[in-house]
Amino acid sequence: MTLNNGTTTSHGPTAGAARMPGYAGTLAAACGAVFVAQVANALPASLNGLLQADLDTHGSQLTWVTSAFMVTVVCFEFTFGVLGDLFGRRRLVVAGTLLVAAGSTVAALAPTVQVLWVGAALNGLGAGAMFPGSLTAITAVARTPRERSHAVAVWSGFLSAGAALSPLLGGMFAELGSWRGSFWVLVGLALVSAVLTLALSAESKAPEGRRFDVPGQITFALGLILVLYGAVEGPESGWSTLPVVLAFVVGACFLAVFVRVELRAEAPILDLSLFRNRAFTVSAVAAVIGMLAFLGACFATSMWLGPVQHQDPIRVALPFLALQGPAFVLIPVVSRLLHRVAASWLLTSGFVLMAAGCLLCARLDVENPHLGAFAAPALLIGVGFALTVSSVTAVALDSVPPRLAGMASATTNMLRDLGFALGPVVVGAVALSHAGSAFAAHLAGGGLPAGQLAAARGVAAAGGPIAVDSLPPGAPGAAAHGLALDALGSGFSTAFLVCGVAAAVAAALTAFGMIGQSAHRPSQSGEPAARPGASAGGTAEPAPAVPRP
């Protein structure tokens, strides 16, 4: 069978034929792999409070637990797609699951938060291999477009289910033992997935014309990591400190070199000519900003309920059913809508709903522990995300010629994941900077006894308001607990507000930036594009894009 870009993956009739040997097993293994990868992604959401208490972390350190995963995914997703095409998708998925098992083992044994970062980064590398490898494996064994669409819909359902259930699973096992037990469960799931992939999945390759863009990969990874490091560390280390300033400057230089390299590369990992198309550029920018808003809101929710309010992991996990669940439940609805409604309008509607939910979250009272206050805002954000996550790639595909569909889908997915990576970074920077300033002002006029005041300032200097908020009753500085809670509530309310504004900007971009562009028509295929890496460089036919928050 030859896909629309000429890549040969199988032979024989393409219509009305029996399924290829290994189709059912490959689909089952791929669904199991993507579920495990997504569990690894979302697991820390319900554990931030326990991590803060057990490892004595402060705000930016918790940000890195989430960011280390997404940064590695974004940095290497194009390269993983090439690896799968050259050496085999089944091998790539197995390697990814073993990396997740190794990363989760490191996390489970981590004596410090710095070791936990290493585990999260290994999990991100593993998941970054599993996402494109599993998707391309099932598109390679499907014989017809209809069968391929069905397979990817099932795959996307397992991915969405992993996002919705992971915080709940983490919370349940943390309640039974400790947060370390959650990672041991993930080790077991990853090993089972590796065995299933080896036993059930068919191997496939597409090496023709595929090669590495080593200079582009190196400059992109270094530039992105350095810029994100500066953004994460700035709130607590100080924006004018030498390490933060150097990170921004050197990172920006690497990214500038990356652009120059890609303009001259024979096989670039990012085809910059795509951005000459206005509709594609608008959808790409909206993807980054909108997904920043979504995962930023998710991260702010986990921090609000966990390290700030110190709620049980199970209670922290419950709002994520509303935040992540609609992307799974509404898959058939969104698929039908993409056939009948212009994807750009679905995109705009979704961003509007996300903006409304974030703005409602910004009005929450940090002293109110009841989860009912999160129900409506979380559901609005979740439904909005369900409408946008598939539509953004449909808009991108509708705006470019068919010959560029593969690269367009890969680029859009990478930019969407960049938004996911930026979400916790931006939220952490905004919330912690604002909370630190507010706490200092509260202390100045709080009327605390001199001893308590000095102790609170010392604790805040070392770990920020979150450290003061976590002091046990009677400890030096604990009298400032209420002041720290108010400051943190103000900081994260501001962060929710920023997420709402970002979603509103994305809505305005898609509503007014595509006037007169082809993206206003309904998606011709009704199917958004493949996962990043699966189609990087145009090696796979477009297939539904799905959430990976």
Image (cartoon, rainbow, N blue to C red):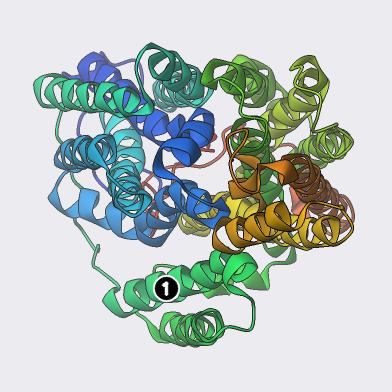
Q: Observer-nearest residue: 78 or 85?
A: 78
Whether 81 is drawn above or below 269: the answer is: above
Amino acid type at mark 1? Phe
Q: x, y percentage for residue 210?
A: 25, 62
Mark count: 1
Q: Quadrant of residue 158?
A: top left
Q: Quadrant of residue 436?
A: bottom right
* Residue 239 in view in this figure: yes
Q: In the image, what residue occupies the spot 40% across and 26% down?
A: 148
At a point 29% along the width and 28% down the height, the residue shown is: 33
The percent coordinates of residue 248 (x first, y second) are 55, 81
Question: In front: 549, or 65?
Answer: 65
Mark 1, Cα crowd under 10 Å, few <14 / some 14-19 / many 20+, is many
Q: Position of residue 192 (x, y in %)?
A: 18, 20
Taking the spot 17% from the left edge, 54% from the top edge, the residue there is: 86
Q: Is residue 286 visible?
A: no
Q: Is residue 481 above or below residue 113?
A: above
**Secondary element at image label 1:** helix
224 to 397, vertically: above or below: below
| Quarter the N terminus occupies | top left
- Is 249 left or right of 477, judged from the image as shown? left
What residue would you read off at disc 1? 220
* Residue at image coords 58%, 41%: 475
Q: Compare residues 441 and 309 and report the one nearer the observer.
A: 441
Q: Position of residue 98 (x, y in %)?
A: 17, 37
Residue 295 relative to residue 361: left or right: left
Looking at the rendering, in which quadrant would you find the C terminus?
top right
* Location of residue 155 (image quadrant): top left
